[in-house]
Image (tube, grey):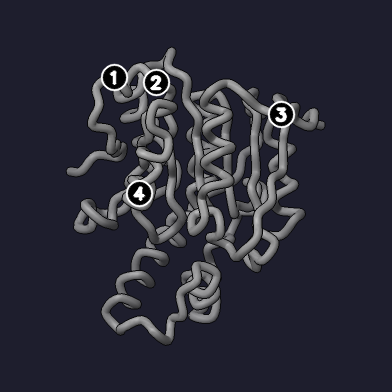
Amino acid sequence: MGTWISTWSTDPADAALPALLCLPPAGAGCQQFRSWQPALAGIAQVYGVQLPGRENRWREPMPDTFGEAVAATAEELAATVAADRPLIVFGHSFGGLLGYELSRLVRPRALVVSGCRAPGFWDGAGRGIVDDAEELDKLFDTAGVDPALLDEATRDLMVAMLRKDARLSLSYVHRPGDRLDVPVHAWGADGDETVSSEELDGWAAVTTAGFARHRTTGGHHAVLRRPEPVLEHLAGLLRGEGAPLTPAP
């Protein structure tokens, strides 16, 4: 069985730095965050969450429920990153939802999400991806990929991975419970057709420690295609910096 947590640091001294945990969007693996380690050299050790069914875990079965995925990630994170080590959690799209539920268990210094609707808007949200080819194409389009240009094998592989995570998201039920006591930052893109302003603003309701909205240009995956603004933001948080946040309601 593969591991749920990956890292790309080669310097043992990085273990003394704050940790940045990155959770990828639906249908993707965490290797896309490999380039973030040199970008944050001397600031953080970058970790990625790798769910089964992709990249080096392609042959492993997906967990039966969303909760199982969160619990398994939290267990391995606790064994990997010391509890007293500063931790920032970053999640994009579906990864933001995973990051939120994980943050309820591990209490990071801050939670940063991008292209991700707030938890209260997620119930049943993956149904369109499972059943609707047009919705799948919309996700390809917002990633800057024209599905018509993909060869059949590549498209089938991408569709299979997307649908695995969409089915997993259908097992998610938002149970508000206690709000987070860590700051939440939500990034949105002006051209994102899949997440509305209302769905991003909903993140303010999940925390008592302050909320901030950040905007960029592009489609749903703009933050991953041009990560420089969010990397600068994350670097500041990892250093313990940060602008004042809007008080949570």
Which of disc 4 and disc 1 is earlier in sequence?
Answer: 1
Q: Give the answer, above or below, for where 131 lies relative to 198.
A: below
Q: Distance between the Cα atoms at labels 3 and 2? A: 22 Å
Which of disc 3 and disc 4 is earlier in sequence?
Answer: 4
Residue 164 seen anywhere in this rendered image of the structure: yes
| Nearer to me, 94 or 212 | 212
| Residue type, numbered disc 3 | Ala
Q: Residues within 10 Å of mark 4 (few under 14, many from 20)?
A: many
- State the image coordinates of residue 61 (x, y, percent, origin top left): 25, 54
Which of disc 4 and disc 2 is earlier in sequence?
Answer: 2
Instruction: Give the secondary structure at mark 2.
Output: loop
Q: Residues within 10 Å of mark 2 (few under 14, many from 20)?
A: some
Q: Distance between the Cα atoms at labels 1 and 2? A: 8 Å
Q: Which residue is mark 1?
A: 13
Residue at image point 60% right, 44% down: 174
Q: Which residue is mark 3?
A: 243
1 and 2 marks in contact (CB < 8 Å): yes
- State the image coordinates of residue 26 (x, y, percent, origin top left): 44, 58
| Nearer to me, 221 or 157 | 221
Q: Residues within 10 Å of mark 1 (few under 14, many from 20)?
A: few
Numbered mark located on residue 17 in the image:
2
Q: Distance between the Cα atoms at labels 1 and 4? A: 23 Å
Residue at image point 62% right, 23% down: 241
Q: Distance between the Cα atoms at labels 2 and 4? A: 20 Å
Instruction: Give the secondary structure at mark 1.
Output: helix
2 and 4 marks in contact (CB < 8 Å): no
- State the image coordinates of residue 160 (x, y, percent, origin top left): 34, 69
| Residue type, numbered disc 2 | Leu
Residue at image point 57% right, 21% down: 240
4 and 3 marks in contact (CB < 8 Å): no
Q: Which residue is mark 4?
A: 30
| Residue type, numbered disc 1 | Ala
